[in-house]
Each structure stands twice: as C-alpha cells, then as structure tokens.
Amino acid sequence: MTVRDKKVLIIGGSRGIGAEAVRRFAADGATVAFTYHRSELEADALRQGTGAHPVRCDVKFSNSVKIAVDKAIDVLGGIDCLICNAAISDINLVTDIGEERWEEIIDTNLNGVYYAINYCLPAMISRHSGSIITVSSMWGQVGASCEVAYSAAKAGVIGMTKALAKEVGPSGIRVNSIAPGMIDTDMNAGIASEIVDEICDETPLCRIGKPSDIASVMEFLASDESSFITGQIIGVNGGLII
Ligand code: NDP
C-alpha cells in the first residue's frame, strides 16, 4: 500500500488518532498538512518531528475552515486526500446537555465535516480524482446512551458519506468513513478503567484499539489500492459490533 507523494490534509491532526495519521502518512512519503485548534504546542512538535504543515482552524466556523483549506492547498499544491477527523465528545443525559453544548457538538462533529468537504471538492472535481475519508464512530451506527448528540452527529456523518459517494463517484472521487470502536486516546481519558475492562471483555479481539489501528485503514483508503471502494463504512472495533 503506498501513499508516497499523495497530498493529504488531515482535519484534526494535533492529537490522538489524527496525530498518529500525520506521523504515518509523513513517514510513508506523503506530503501532509494538518489542522489544530487548541493544541498549538502539540502541533508544533508534530511539525518538527514529521515535516508536516500545521494550520490553525476551528471547524465550527465555515470561514476558519475555508482559510485552512486554502492554506493547505497552497502549501501542498493541491489535495489528493482529505481526512475529516476532528471531533469532540460529551457524556451526559440528553435532558442535561443543553442547547448550547448540543449545537457545539453538531457544529464540530457534523457541520465541520461538511465545511471541509465543501471547500476541498471543487479542486478534486476539476482534477477528476480524490479520496475523502470521514471519521464517524460505532456510536453513529448503533447509538450510545448518554451520547445522544455525539451519536446523532456521527450518524449524520455516515449518511453524508454514503450520499456524497453517490454524488461525486462519477467525478472520480471516492468517499468512505471509518467507524472506530473504543480507541486509546484523550477522548476516553475520563472513562473509568472498570468500564474499559468491561468493553475489552465484550470485544471478540479482547482489547480496545490503538490510534495506529485507525491510521493504517486511513492509509489504505487514501491509497490507490482501495480504488474500487466508495460509500463504505469501515468498522474498526475489534468485533465489538458486527
Ligand atoms: P482526540 O480528542 O484525541 O483529538 C481530537 C482532535 O480533534 C484534536 O486534534 C483536536 O484539536 C481536534 N478538534 C476538536 N475540536 C476541534 C475544533 N473545534 N476545530 C478543529 N479541531 C478540533 O480524539 P480522537 O483522536 O480520539 O478522535 C479522532 C476521531 O475519531 C474523532 O472524529 C472521534 O469522534 C473519532 N472516534 C474516536 C473514538 C475513540 O474511542 N477515541 C471512537 C470512535 C470515533 P486540538 O486538540 O488542537 O483542539
């Protein structure tokens, strides 16, 4: 599988799965730009370690995404692969979450994906090629209690991925989603170790995932080896949901 010389923009590349993707793609010869929002120090360390180009962006705001995409196109000389990875999560009863936080989750996890895709698509359509990878979640597939906003946004990402694959396939662009199970990142730092143990017990492969488990599928979907795959939701969850 090769991503050598691919021009890759990773939205949400400063930490966790996104940061691992930045390291993997850069190590395997891709030219990489990535966005960060709050984690400036982490982004700078990643730049120094990989040569990838950091761009600041808050995906909740269309204009911020536009500026970041324009900078990335400038610095990379185009985009072959867009990875929409940025998201936030919140564990709360739906009756306690409040409208403001609800909107923040939908804006970050769903609208932000639309903004990035919308600004990257015209150049991909003109070149008649491109791979778009969204990062959804197994909770978008089956729903998580106390994560109604997150599940709703991720289900939206899954619907967006399938619809867009149909719309832009004839333009030579593939669109797929990775739906991770529980992965060992900051996003799960607040989850009690007994709950993590329970999830491992219920998982056929008896463990939670590592960022590299997701990054390797990203590389496959970015590479030409997946050239006949579009509109798919690839579960990477150790078999927890089948
Ligand atoms: P992390 O919390 O470790 O990292 C989240 C990333 O998103 C950071 O780079 C962060 O940037 C960025 N981000 C958050 N808010 C914004 C914003 N408003 N604008 C721009 N960037 C933002 O998450 P993970 O690595 O765990 O998750 C990556 C993806 O995988 C997400 O889409 C998540 O929903 C999905 N996923 C993760 C699972 C898990 O168990 N970890 C399970 C299922 C899906 P910064 O730090 O610079 O603010």
Image: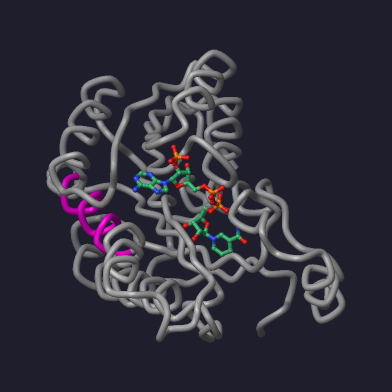
Magenta region, main secondary structure: helix
Name the spot of residue 134 as percent of width and height, x first.
40, 59
Name the spot of residue 172 as percent of width and height, x first.
25, 55
| 84 or 121: nearer the viewer | 84
Residue 71, picture quadrant: top left
User: Is residue 236 rendered to the left or right of residue 32?
Assistant: right
Q: Is residue 13 above or below residue 208?
A: above
User: Is residue 40 rendered to the left or right of residue 120?
Assistant: right
Q: Residue at x 21, y 63 (%)?
A: 168
Viewport quadrant of the N terminus: top right
Q: Is residue 161 above or below residue 128?
A: below
Chosen colour scheme: one colour
Q: Residue at x 54, y 33 (%)?
A: 25
Q: Is residue 115 magenta?
A: yes
| 3 or 69: nearer the viewer | 69
Give, as a single range, the part of the protein colored magenta. 110-119
Name the spot of residue 235 as percent of width and height, x first.
59, 71
User: Is residue 97 rendered to the left or right of residue 183?
Assistant: left
